[in-house]
Amino acid sequence: MGNLLILFTAFLCICLFVALHYVLHEYLWVPHRVQFIMNSQGIRGPPYEFIHGNNKEALQMRKEASSKPMALTHDIFPRVMPHDYSCIKKYGKNYLSWNGVRAQLVIRDPELVKEVLKTSEKAFSKPKPSYFFKKLLGDSISTIKSEKWGARHRKLANHAFHGESLKNMIPAMIASVGTMLEKWKDKEGKEMEVFQEFRFLTSEMISRTAFGSSYLEGEKIFDMLMNKFWKSADEIESDKLEKTIHDSVMKIIKQREEKVMTGEVDSCGHDFLGLLVNVYHDSDEKNRFLIQDIIDECKTFYFAGQETTNFLLAWITLLLAIHTDWQDKARAEVTMIIKETLRLYPPLNGVVRKAVRDVQLGELALPNYLDLNIRFIALHHDPAVWGDDVHLFKPERFAEGIAKATNNNAAAFMPFRLEPRFCVGMSFAITETKIALSMILQRYTFTLSPTYVHAPLPNLSLKPQHGLHLLFHSLH
């Protein structure tokens, strides 16, 4: 017994030593080493605090900023990201921050952003998605890391959102907007909360373009994703919902396959699902998608497309409701208005990329324990790039293109940019927005309701915290 007790005590001591070594290494030595390396190169920032880094301070500042009333201004950076705003003022455009024990080089300098874009993607990877996010989207282009597999998914997505494929989706978009405007006839001259209206619109647009004539079944599938899957904390219930979604998509696919086999139609369709099914039946086995790939892509198509267009339409109508003189101009200058809205209220506040090895970025030597955090909203609200009128709504700044608007700092305007390439759904979102906006402006003028409270909600994407209340008046 004495020997067993000695062995057990020795084993316990070894375990405690290993645990202590891990804690000291990961939570103290590594952070201080990274801080020393970056400080020696002139990159400074708020000091690292044990375990939580700067998260506690950042959260407190966000709570304080959100609790205060906000004037009707487009100078939103100090409100939605007060910690970043404060650090940039104190430490400069590029500074070192701490997300827990993970160091982040926060970038606002367009020149350094250019260096990131020139650096091989192999040097910087996407952060590992959370368990729930991975379960929700699977191996879609938003989560996959395999270069070869990702290229195949991206090629398909590019095909789906460009050229003839995109043109084929336009009638479905027009039909969706027409349905919404019919409902608005009874609301003319009354206050209307349009953020929710646009949420329903973009959801129907996505359903129609993804599932074509099967869009009602598609709406049910997406409703499960939005209203049930997100809210289900139970693992078993989540698995049941996942199986229901899988079975529902399979039912639509089988119906289309049967029509092709009986000669009723010559293909599985030209909507998004049809394109995916055609790849599923590709004659070259190497290019084929699995059924799960099709389902994962449909999920990503919905989440990315629905939210992006919803928010973009909301902020555009807000800006046009404030600057009513631009409503007439918008019929001819819609592209400039979209770009200026994306500048002031970008769909993404920023992106994080992980350094997978020690890498040289411009004049900076970055250790592999570091993340890059590119703050789009900081770039879009930088007076050094856009001038003293940076917080004003001035679509004409884009009249001669992005290069002229950014003083030849094109990397300072990145509304859809995820890595060194544009978001593959950008063309789809812009087309949706142009169609909806043009059809609304053909029928209505609109102004801001006196009840509207300007409070952009700080999150991954910007949304009106208290909704968006406008007054609509018929042109006819």
Image (cartoon, rainbow, N blue to C red):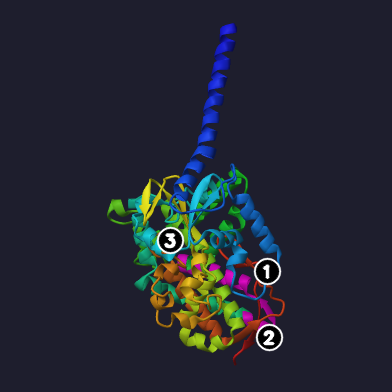
Q: Which label belongs to residue 346?
A: none
Q: Which label belongs to residue 466?
A: 1
Q: Per the image, is 191 magenta?
A: yes
Q: Which label belongs to residue 189?
A: 2
359 in relation to 180, above or below: above
- For mark 3, what is the residue? 418
**Element type where label 3 sits in the image:** loop
Residue stretch rendered in magenta on the structure:
184-210
- Going by the numbered disc 3, the residue's amino acid type is Leu
Mark with earlier residue (2, 3): 2
Q: Nearer the viewer, residue 351 or 151?
A: 351
Marks 3 and 1, how far apart in space?
A: 29 Å
Check whether the beta carbons of the residues at disc 2 and disc 3 lie within 8 A of each other: no
Q: Nearer the viewer, residue 327 or 245?
A: 327
Q: Nearer the viewer, residue 9 or 53?
A: 53
Res. 11 image quadrant:
top right
Marks 2 and 3, how far apart in space?
A: 41 Å
**Element type where label 1 sits in the image:** loop
148 in relation to 200, above or below: above
x, y percent for residue 43:
47, 54
